[in-house]
Structure formats: C-alpha cells, structure tokens
Image: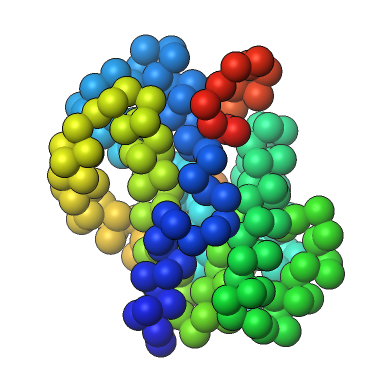
C-alpha cells in the first residue's frame, strides 16, 4: 500500500488528460444550471452519487484483479451516451500510457494489448491502482474524488469562481465522498460485474451529446 502512489494518481497534474475535460460542467454552465458555487455544489453532489459511484465501483473491481474484459463490458453497458463512451476510452488510453510509464506492470501491458483503442477509464484507473500497489478501497476513493475534482476545477475556469470557495465546497463533500467510495468498494467485493452499481445521470448523457456537437468549446467534453 503506497500513500505516495495514491497521491500521485489522484493529482490533477498526473498526465492522464483529465484536465482537458469538464465532466459535463461546461454544458451545465451554458444551460444555466451551474452559475455560482451553490449550483456547482449541487451539480457535483449529483455527479458523485451517479457517475462517481459507478466509476468508483468499476475502479475498485479492477483493483481487485477482476477480469478487465468483463469490467470493460460492464462500463460500456453503464455508459449509454456514445460521446461519453468515446471520451471514457480516450481518457483510458491516455491514463494507460501514463500508468505504464509510472508503474510498469504485466497487467497494464495485457490491458493495452486487449484494447488498442482504449479501455474505459475507470477500468484502467483500477488496473493502474493495482499496479501501483493500492487497495481497492483506495482506488474507489481516488476515483470518487476524481469524479468531482475535475468538474470543480472546470467551474473555476468557466465561471471565474473563487477557488477558495470551491475548495471549501469540495471539503464539505468529503463525508459523502467517503460514503460513496465505501459503497463502491463493498459492491465490487461481490466479484460480479453485473452486480456493480448502475446509477444513471440522464442529463449528463444529454449534455455530453450536445457538447460533442459544439463548434466552439473550452473543454474536450
């Protein structure tokens, strides 16, 4: 168990491409649903308990060494938006490239060979956690954190929000982050990909499809 590896993997500066994606925040801002710190917090809370829960469970399962082909199929089934599926695989490919440089591991090599166009990002995230010596619970925590930290950072850039207020909002979400991560890890422990959480966020799916058609945008998704 490596705390330093956990910090590195959860660091937004880790070269996995996440900084170029808003997690739906850009479309939510344009729609007027996110316009200040309070509405951002509501958006992050909803994202945490839907997308965040699903990605954390997939990551925890991959960190347990479960079959990544089955987990990738499970991720595909839980991502109805074609735009989000493409984004997830693109981010998975970028993360895997960084992970293989940081933590060389046969499991990562096999994952790259099996998915030359990219496995889903949460599956790669969990496989990376396994290669880095992290526990499934740590993988779930880091994935849950990533599900809100990226969009929060995007909101600072999109709306010019006070970064201190945004940091405080994330800090207040900490108890919910812990709960979601624990729920995700517990679900993954059953060892059945079909039993993993499948919480949906239809508005995020709709936003992703809209965003992918924009000619001018700040973020890739």
Tell me what residue is drawn at x 60 percent, y 17 percent: 216
Quarter of image, res 156: top left
Residue drawn 61% across the image and 66% down it: 98
143 shown above or below 189: above
For residue 2, above or below residue 79: below
Q: Which residue is depicted at the point 16% across and 41% down? A: 164
Q: Nearer the viewer, residue 68 or 218?
A: 218
Q: Is residue 190 visible?
A: no
Q: Residue at x 49, y 45 (%)?
A: 19
Q: Position of residue 200 (x, y in %)?
A: 51, 37
Indicate left or right for 175 with 105 as reference.
left
Quadrant where the N terminus sits is bottom left
Q: Nearer the viewer, residue 149 or 68?
A: 149
Q: Is residue 185 above or below residue 171?
A: below
Q: Position of residue 144 (x, y in %)?
A: 40, 55
Q: Is residue 99 left or right of residue 129?
A: right
Camera-nearest residue between 215 and 198: 215
In this rendering, the count of numbered labels is 0
Colour treatment of the image: rainbow
Q: Position of residue 218 (x, y in %)?
A: 52, 26
User: Is residue 86 at least partly visible in the picture?
Assistant: yes
Q: Is residue 49 left or right of residue 173?
A: right
- Image quarter of the C terminus: top right
Residue 8, image x, y percentages: 42, 69
């Amino acid at each position: 168990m490596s705390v330093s590896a956990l910090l590195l993997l959860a660091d937004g500066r880790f070269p996995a491409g996440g900084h170029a994606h808003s997690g739906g925040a850009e479309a939510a801002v344009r729609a007027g649903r996110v316009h200040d710190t309070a509405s951002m917090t509501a958006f992050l809370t909803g994202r945490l308990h839907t997308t965040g829960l699903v990605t954390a469970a997939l990551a925890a399962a991959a960190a347990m060494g479960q079959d990544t082909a089955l987990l990738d199929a499970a991720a595909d089934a839980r991502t109805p938006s074609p735009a989000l599926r493409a984004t997830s695989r693109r981010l998975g490919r970028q993360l895997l490239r960084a992970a293989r440089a940081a933590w060389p591991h046969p499991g990562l090599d096999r994952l790259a060979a099996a998915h030359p166009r990219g496995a889903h990002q949460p599956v790669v995230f969990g496989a990376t956690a396994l290669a880095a010596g992290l526990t499934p619970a740590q993988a779930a925590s880091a994935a849950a954190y990533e599900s809100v930290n990226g969009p929060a950072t995007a909101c600072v850039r999109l709306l010019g929000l006070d970064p201190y207020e945004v940091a405080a909002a994330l800090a207040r979400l900490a108890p919910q982050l812990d709960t979601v991560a624990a729920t995700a890890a517990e679900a993954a422990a059953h060892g059945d990909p079909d039993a993993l959480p499948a919480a949906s966020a239809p508005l995020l799916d709709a936003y992703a499809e809209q965003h992918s058609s924009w000619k001018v945008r700040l973020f890739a998704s």
